[in-house]
Image (spheres, rainbow, N blue to C red):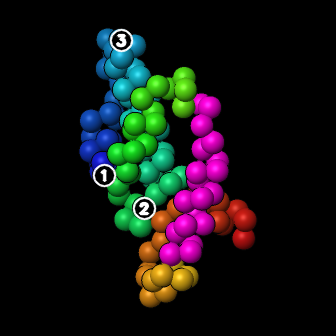
Amino acid sequence: MIYLTWLRQNFQQLPVDANDVVIAQHARAHIMMIIGGCLISDTSGARVHFLYLLLLSNLSEASHYSWGAAILTSLFRALDRVVLVKPDQTKIGGCLLLLQSWA
């Protein structure tokens, strides 16, 4: 897991003399912050799984992935876990904004 605070501290500001590699690194970091902070968050809301960084290794290829299905699956998995596995759990992961829009 990668902490979102670490991503914010290290990739908040793009250097003025950034080359294409540094720009791509910052783009990946910001996408990771969006994934971990809102779209596919865990119950802590403070970490993002390292797996998503591997999926972003080729940014042009990442646009062909089915991110919407992954976000919906993550939400359904989190809801299933709260309802069936741990009904006394007080926190939930997944895209709660999607859940609020649906409700």
Q: Which mark is residue 42?
A: 2
Asked if the residue at tag 1 contacts the one at tag 2, i.e. Cβ–Cβ closer than 8 Å, the answer is yes
Q: Which structural element holds mark 1?
A: loop
In front here: 15 or 34? Answer: 34
| Magenta residue span | 63-81
Q: At 60% from the left edge and 44% from the top edge, which residue is drawn? A: 67
Spatial CA distance of label 2 from label 1 is 10 Å
Q: Quick check: 31 left or right of 103?
A: left
Tell me if residue 34 comes above or below residue 58 in the rendering: below
Kind of residue at badge 2:
Asp
Q: Quadrant of residue 98?
A: bottom right
Q: Residues within 10 Å of mark 3 (few under 14, many from 20)?
A: few
- Is residue 30 something one can see in this rendering? no
Q: At 46% from the left edge and 25% from the top edge, which residue is drawn? A: 58
Kind of residue at badge 1:
Met
3 or 1: tag closer to the N-terminus:
1
Q: At 35% from the left edge and 55% from the top edge, which residue is drawn? A: 47
* Residue 30 screen position, x and y as percent: 43, 37
**Of helix, strand and loop, which mostly describes the magenta segment?**
helix
Q: Quadrant of residue 25?
A: top left
Spatial CA distance of label 2 from label 3 is 33 Å
Q: Residues within 10 Å of mark 1 (few under 14, many from 20)?
A: few
Q: Which mark is residue 1?
A: 1
Q: At 58% from the left edge and 63% from the top edge, which residue is drawn? A: 75
31 falls in the magenta region: no
* Residue 96 screen position, x and y as percent: 57, 64
